[in-house]
Image (cartoon, grey):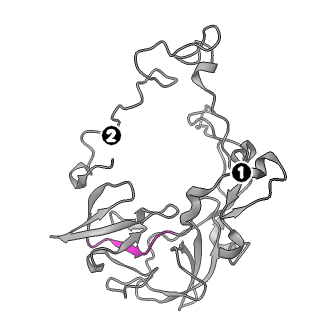
Amino acid sequence: MKTYSPTTPSRRQMAIPNYNEILTASKPFKKLVKRIKKHSGRNNSGRITVRHQGGGNLKLYRMIDFRQTKINIPAKIETIEYDPYRSGFIALAVYRDGERRYILASKDMNVGDEIIALENAPLKNGNRLALKNIPVGYSVYNIELNRNGGKIARSAGSYAQVLAHDSGWTQLKLSSGEIRKVLWDNFASLGQTSNPDHGLTNIGKAGGSRVRGIRPTVRGTAMNPCDHPYGGGEGRQPRGTKRPKTRWGKITGGRKTRKKKKWSNNLIIKRRK
């Protein structure tokens, strides 16, 4: 982590990953970026449906290959880059046929490393292979659920541990503590997602959230009665309602929100804590 001299109050606490030691390119590969229009949390009627979004610096979306469909074609890592749309780093892979694609970088991935996607690929960091061919105890990330690209364990520092293989299913322990079954023909990448120090980041000041496109959150007790169930009163008033509620009067805090008939219920062996 990179810390700063306390030249200002906000600099005193600030800590970010040391990008100069990790990243090898400052500009993205032009053919693999596109602009995504910002909506600031508004729907097609112009009404805010997701609060606390808006503003922020301009950024380009990097088109990531979560599926890695170029089977049995080796690739060499050309650059390790920052991605403003995700917490982990990304890597630009150059395949032997000359095509370039962005992939999620693993924790110890370096420029010049060779990777391959193959059902029975060598057990090497960054390689992508079928879950049934990964021994028990190994860590994996960017895991597929339905052979349509990696869906879980994609954020910075996340991974899942292979616990067992049993009659067409692989049991994975996720970073939340949940143990679930995944079809063992699905693919996953070996290792851990890059930038594990992301959780130690301290942006130091409120402006750090604004440049990331996050707008302020107002406390319910600071609002008027017409705006929130906790609003109104003289000075600092207690909640006044039996149980915690959202701005729209929905019960929150300890209430189970998962659907009872969700399709993946029978795949979860042990719930997260």
Q: Residues within 10 Å of mark 2 (few under 14, many from 20)?
A: few
**Image height check: is 69 above or below 75?**
above
In the picture, the disc for residue 256 is: none
Describe residue 52's horizontal placement relative to residue 122 as left or right: right
Disc 2 marks a residue whose amino acid type is: Arg
Q: Which residue position holds label 1? A: 13
Which residue: 71% across, 76% down? Answer: 25
Describe residue 34's horizontal placement relative to residue 69 as left or right: right
> In the image shown, does 147 or 57 lie closer to the viewer?
57
Residues shaded magenta: 184-193
> In the image shown, does 106 or 28 lie closer to the viewer?
106
Badge 1 or badge 2: first in the primary sequence: 1
Residue 160 occupies quadrant:
bottom left
Q: Residues within 10 Å of mark 1 (few under 14, many from 20)?
A: some
Q: Which residue position holds label 2? A: 258
Residue 192 within the segment the image draws in magenta: yes
